[in-house]
Image (cartoon, rainbow, N blue to C red):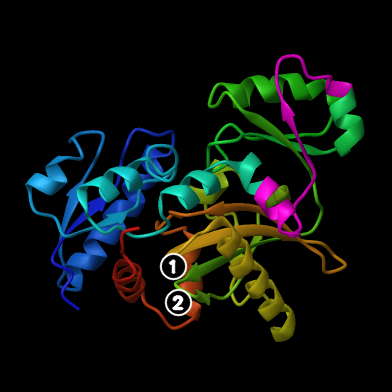
Amino acid sequence: MDFGKVAVLFGGSSAERDVSLMSGKAVLEALQRAGVDAHAFDPAERDLHILKEEGFDRAFIVLHGRGGEDGTVQGALELMGIPYTGSGVMASALSMDKWRTKMVWLAAGLPTPRYAILDELSDWDAVAAELGLPIFVKPVHEGSSMGATKVTEADQLKAAWELAARYDDLVIAEEFVTGAEMTAPFLGERALPLVRIVAPDGNYDYQHKYFTDDTRYDCPCGLPEAQERELQALIMKSAKVLGCRGWGRADLILTDDGRPYLLEMNTAPGMTGHSLVPMSARVAGLSFEALCLAILAEARLG
């Protein structure tokens, strides 16, 4: 397939810039190895309108977090008429918002942990009583566990809120659901194999996601085939109700008695050496280059 001149958008100005730089470099090199006329483009260093001026035909979005996953870049590319990878404006904006994602999933009858929105007037004891302990506190519009805290005592909630509030005006507290941490990528209309994440002491934070080898990833995930198919169907439904397309990755917890709880949707997941989508794709028979080409082939407008 002739993709024309392709801009790989990575870097950006979000809190996840460093991870985006790693992801984007890997994608750029893979596309170039595959013979694609691909070029690096960092929106933090160059204005987006240059894409139109320089005749780019497609954009591969590897921007993580705000300014890349939240619909803003997607909207600019729509206006310029440049097809792009991943979800459109609405689904990107919705999926970046953990609070509104939960509301859509709950309205569709999909399982997700209970939650509360926090602010400086929150009654910390009441939040702990309502959700139980431990509790996860995190910014609504950040990824990669940025600003997230696992709270084990009610008197830790205020400090956890203060940390999250440095990243975002909206902060969410989420019920801690005990079980296996799983992630499930999708590519087009196809769910890829699930990955089971086993982090030290159950702490899958920013450091353990990207910069250590202490976390274990099991793919195949070890579930019976029928159960994995059921979870893959849940993932595809969770993406569909948000309006997602192209590719993405949903995170979930599977309790010991087999109940799944959706956590969040990622519309431009990591593509680093520690990333989960390439790992799952390999088990499905797709090399990293083949994965990048398949994602690029899904680029579209509207």
Label 1 residue SS: helix
Q: Which residue is mark 1?
A: 278
* Residue 54, position as x, y percentages in the image: 7, 49
**Residue 135 in view, yes or no:** yes
Q: Circle 2 — which element?
A: helix
Q: Quadrant of residue 156?
A: top right
**Marking on residue 301:** none
Residue sitting farthest toward the top: 121
- Pick whichever, 84 or 124, lies toward us: 84
Disc 1 residue crowd, few under 14, some 14–19, many 20+, Cα 10 Å:
many
The reply to whether residue 203 is in sight is no
Instruction: Write the residue at 47% across / 54% down.
Output: 267
Q: Is residue 302 left or right of residue 145?
A: left
Examine the structure image and report whether residue 113 is included in the region drawn in magenta: yes
In x, y percent, where is residue 111?
Answer: 76, 58
Residue 282: assigned label: 2
Determine the residue located farthest toward the right in the rendered image. 129
Q: Residues within 10 Å of mark 2 (few under 14, many from 20)?
A: some
> Answer yes or no: do the residues labelled 1 and 2 have beta carbons within 8 Å?
yes
The residue that appears at 71% across and 15% down in the rendered structure is 120
Q: Looking at the rendering, in which quadrant would you find the N terminus?
A: bottom left
Question: Rounded to the nearest whole Å, what is the CA distance between mark 1 and mark 2?
Answer: 6 Å
Q: What is the three-letter code of the residue carrying label 1? A: Pro
Q: Position of residue 160 (x, y in %)?
A: 69, 25
Residue 91 x %, y %: 49, 52
* 225 sits to left or right of 244: right
| Number of numbered labels in the structure image | 2
Does 85 lie within the magenta span?
no
Magenta segment:
103-125
The kind of residue on which mark 2 rests is: Arg
